[in-house]
Image: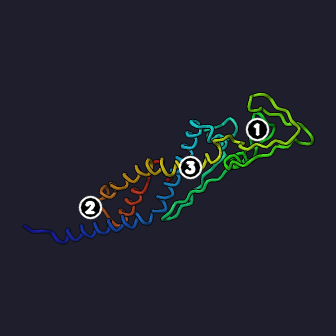
């Protein structure tokens, strides 16, 4: 029995080149992968907060415009992602409110940040006018004195956004979305799919990009 060593050597060279290209491609496209992952996490965060707000409005209604709890157009918060080759960092921030509550005639601009922190609010009548609001007993109250509100967002608003954010990153994300993604990455089927007679260093790099392309991610 005879072996064609020339053909064997050629195949080995192609295989080694392909493998090297795949490994280098994985490193080369790490930032590309992180960019996709960050965008997916951002969108999942928005959906999670909206869903949680609809189920538990008392703890999150302050981070939405009046009457728009749990809607994308009513959000008074945003999340930004900063990605690198080996890192993804998320930063949340509150936005100013432009809507008016049913019991007021002007926006509570810093509604989200003030209610989230649980800061006391002092309301003073304008130009010697009178404040009118609904009391705890449901009756209307009229007063010319300033009024202090200890918990402007209610007893459950303070820290509500922070709690929901922690729950998303430490529970929902870690035990759900990321676990599923890691399981898929443990078996790089893209590597075996590119293993053929025409494999080269370049096809290895392309296979690595396909491997690091997340379904639903950015192109």
Q: Label 2: how many residues lie within 10 Å, few (<14), some (14-19) or many (20+)?
A: few
Q: Nearer the viewer, residue 94 or 185?
A: 94
Q: Is residue 12 above or below residue 145?
A: below
Report how far apart the C-alphas of labels 2 and 3 lie in the structure.
Answer: 50 Å
In this rendering, the count of numbered labels is 3
Asked which quadrant contains residue 152, the reply is: top right
Residue under label 2: 197
- Which image quarter is the N terminus in? bottom left
Q: Position of residue 45 (x, y in %)?
A: 54, 47
Dots 3, 1 in contact, CB < 8 A? no
Q: Give the residue pinned by disc 1.
A: 100
- Say few, some or many: other residues with alpha carbon within 10 Å of mark 3 (under 14 / 14 to 19 / 20 or more): some
Quarter of the rendering containing residue 136: top right
Q: Is residue 49 left or right of residue 209?
A: right
C-alpha distance separating marks 3 and 1: 26 Å
**Mark 1 or 2, nearer chain start:** 1
Q: Earlier in the sequence, mark 3 or mark 1?
A: 1
Where is residue 160 drawn, in percent x and y?
A: 61, 45
Q: Which residue is mark 3?
A: 165
């Amino acid at each position: 029995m005879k072996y064609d060593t020339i053909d064997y050597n050629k195949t080995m060279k192609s295989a080694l080149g392909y493998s090297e290209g795949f490994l280098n491609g994985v490193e080369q496209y790490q930032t590309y992968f992180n960019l996709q992952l960050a965008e997916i996490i951002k969108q999942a965060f928005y959906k999670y907060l909206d869903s949680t707000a609809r189920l538990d409005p008392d703890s999150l209604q302050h981070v939405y415009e009046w009457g728009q709890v749990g809607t994308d157009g009513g959000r008074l918060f945003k999340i930004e992602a900063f990605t690198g080759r080996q890192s993804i960092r998320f930063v949340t921030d509150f936005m100013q409110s432009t809507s008016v509550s049913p019991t007021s005639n002007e926006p509570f601009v810093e509604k989200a940040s003030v209610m989230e922190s649980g800061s006391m609010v002092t309301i003073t009548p304008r130009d010697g006018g009178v404040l009118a609001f609904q009391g705890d007993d449901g009756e209307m109250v009229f007063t010319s004195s300033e009024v202090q509100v200890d918990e402007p967002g209610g007893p459950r608003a303070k820290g509500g956004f922070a709690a929901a954010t922690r729950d998303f990153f430490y529970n929902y994300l870690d035990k759900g979305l990321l676990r599923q993604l890691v399981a898929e990455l443990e078996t790089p089927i893209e590597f075996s799919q590119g293993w053929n007679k025409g494999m080269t260093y370049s096809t290895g790099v392309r296979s690595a990009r396909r491997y690091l392309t997340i379904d639903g991610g950015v192109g």
